[in-house]
Image (cartoon, rainbow, N blue to C red):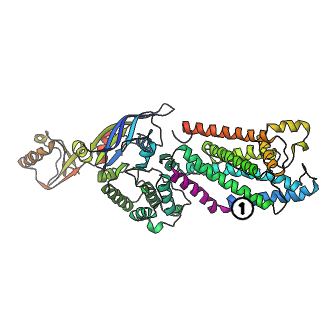
């Protein structure tokens, strides 16, 4: 069995107002995994992360990080964790190098300028080491926050919306950084609204809704299980309606009848493509091109949360 | 104890002093020097000795106390409020550091800065007037106790404040008036009899009186009472901070 680095059992968080932000969360994340937590706004993603990291007090249940209870053994538990929160929050008057060095010290690690240098170089920040943080761009600030979270060599890195407001190029470079961290054995937990991000990076995906874990599934299995495929057939001659003999297939006409689209589950119905093509031939329907599309994680997610995302 | 964290926060706070040298050091020294010029020289030259001490020298302990209290509050409240305001408090709350260590770091740095400032003002005062220190040990003791107590008060204000107005309202509307009415610039026996009694409600009276006694061996109230009052105030601040630790008030939800 794979060793769990995060182990959450029966976690509840109810605020003084009575609002129940987390309800009976049970989650286990193995070492070295990239785990994406998805959910609509207000679903409880950030509350869950903040509870694990010690910023929010749990109402019930237990959380262990690398075997350490986050309440009773908070020092040992927090030493394992690096957190990059959603908001761009860096000390505006500090230099990049000194703010990253500060983070290392606050997490109880002895001064190690060589490690800080390595982190800054890995994140392409070394040239900015003597720049005041308020003078760097938003994307750079996000990297500084990642550098601060990595300064104490954590085993688990929480990235709460890590690429929000970051341009595509920088986003892709951050993905590479995250993959590099995983190669070094760091477990990554990320929340994101960019489903492409989860699709590109995650090993497993958890969906949280109304403070409850709706599902946890390996990304590929999730897409296989819930994803739909569309087979598009570009017709030589347009059709006015789907022929009666093809009624057994989930077919629609698009593009003024020039494109016949067969929607099927990627998991179950793949075998019916061949009979469909045979039926088209038998019906004398000629086609000039064929393409397939698989539903994105975003479409799956919207289906899962009933369009509330 | 996470000594690395304490050292890191303390050093960062002390480094902030150098980044804001004019605001942190030069400005209070200029303000205090102006008090010397106005009260000590311009007005003081027309006042006879007070409690056997020249008026210029008489006001020095009160002015140092004024600086210790206002700077202790200002340094500590801003130090903890600023990370809350800009959002970097998440780092402290998620770090393997206890609330006690957070207080030691921030209050320690604020107290160090205001104590150093008090000593600088004392040094500056010697340029204007002759100063004796009758009880050096107690002078240092009163100085340290006052800076630590008011830095703790500043820390509490910084946690409580959720906007800049609240950050300044207690120092401006409560501490400064109490200090001015607490015998900084006068001896209590210069007041009418009724006001001599009323003014004893003001806790700052006891601090200024005790501190002045350590300089000139003369006091408005007994030294034991002064020490008792500052001890009481310190205990109250510690109790409030302990409650903040326990509940996570305005820090953790």
Q: Residue at x 62, y 42 (%)?
A: B160
Residue A111 visible? The answer is yes
* Vertical order, A142 against B102 (above or below): below
Q: Nearer the viewer, residue A17 or A101?
A: A101
x, y percentage for residue A241?
17, 44
| Quarter of image, res A12 | top left
User: SS for tag 1?
Assistant: helix
x, y percentage for residue A114?
43, 64
B15 drawn magenta: yes
Mark 1, Cα crowd under 10 Å, few <14 / some 14-19 / many 20+, is few
A179 sits left or right of B19 in the view: left
Specify the farthest residue to the left.
Answer: A282
**Which region shows up in magenta?**
B1-21
A300 sits left or right of A21 in the view: left
x, y percentage for residue A34?
32, 50
Label 1 belongs to which residue? Answer: B26
Q: Residue at x 54, y 43 (%)?
A: B99
Q: Residue at x 26, y 47 (%)?
A: A219
């Amino acid at each position: 069995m794979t060793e769990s680095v995060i182990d959450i059992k029966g976690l509840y968080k109810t605020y003084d107002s009575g609002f129940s932000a987390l309800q009976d969360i049970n989650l286990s994340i193995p070492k070295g995994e990239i785990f994406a937590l998805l959910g609509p706004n207000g679903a409880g993603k950030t509350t869950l992360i903040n509870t694990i990291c010690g910023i929010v007090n749990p109402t019930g249940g237990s959380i262990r990080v690398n075997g350490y209870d986050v309440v009773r053994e908070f020092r040992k538990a927090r030493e394992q964790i690096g957190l990059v929160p959603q908001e761009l929050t860096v000390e505006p008057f500090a230099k990049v190098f000194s703010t990253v060095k500060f983070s290392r010290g606050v997490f109880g690690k002895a001064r190690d300028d060589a490690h800080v240098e390595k982190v800054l170089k890995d994140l392409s920040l070394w040239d900015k080491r003597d720049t005041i943080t308020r003078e760097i761009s938003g994307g750079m600030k996000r990297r500084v926050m990642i550098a601060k979270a990595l300064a104490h060599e954590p085993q688990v890195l929480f990235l709460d919306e890590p690429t929000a407001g970051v341009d595509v190029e920088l986003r892709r470079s951050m993905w590479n950084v995250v993959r590099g961290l995983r190669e070094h054995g760091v477990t990554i937990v990320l929340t994101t609204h960019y489903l492409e991000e989860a699709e590109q990076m995650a090993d497993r995906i958890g969906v949280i809704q109304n403070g409850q874990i709706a599902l946890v599934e390996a990304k590929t299995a999730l897409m296989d299980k819930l994803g739909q495929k569309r087979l598009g057939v570009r017709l030589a001659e347009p059709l006015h309606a789907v022929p009666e003999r093809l009624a057994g297939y989930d077919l629609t006409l698009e593009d003024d009848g020039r494109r016949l689209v067969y929607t099927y589950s990627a998991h179950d119905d793949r075998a019916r493509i061949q009979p469909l093509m045979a039926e088209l031939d038998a019906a004398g329907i000629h086609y000039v091109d064929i393409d397939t599309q698989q539903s994105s994680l975003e479409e799956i997610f919207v289906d899962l949360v009933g369009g509330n995302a | 104890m996470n000594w690395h964290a304490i050292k890191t926060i303390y050093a960062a706070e002390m480094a902030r002093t150098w980044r804001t040298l004019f605001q942190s050091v030069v400005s209070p020294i200029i303000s205090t020097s102006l008090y010397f010029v106005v009260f000590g020289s311009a007005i003081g030259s027309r006042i006879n000795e007070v409690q056997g001490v020249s008026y210029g020298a008489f006001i020095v302990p009160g002015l140092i106390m004024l600086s210790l209290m206002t700077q202790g509050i200002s340094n500590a409240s801003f130090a903890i409020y600023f990370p809350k305001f800009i959002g970097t408090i998440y780092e402290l709350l998620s770090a393997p550091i206890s609330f006690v260590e957070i207080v030691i770091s921030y209050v320690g740095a604020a107290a160090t800065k205001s104590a150093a400032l008090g000593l600088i003002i004392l040094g500056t005062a010697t340029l204007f007037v002759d100063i004796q220190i009758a009880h050096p040990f107690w002078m240092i003791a009163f100085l340290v106790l006052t800076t630590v107590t008011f830095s703790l008060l500043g820390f509490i204000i910084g946690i409580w404040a959720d906007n800049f107005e609240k950050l300044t309202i207690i120092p401006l509307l409560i501490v400064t008036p109490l200090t001015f009415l607490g015998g900084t610039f006068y001896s209590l026996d210069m007041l009418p009899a009724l006001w001599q009694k009323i003014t004893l409600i003001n806790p700052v009276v006891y601090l200024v009186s005790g501190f002045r006694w350590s300089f000139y061996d003369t006091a408005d109230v007994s030294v034991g009472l002064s020490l008792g009052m500052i001890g009481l105030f310190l205990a109250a601040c510690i109790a409030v901070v302990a409650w903040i630790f326990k509940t996570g008030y305005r820090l953790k939800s």
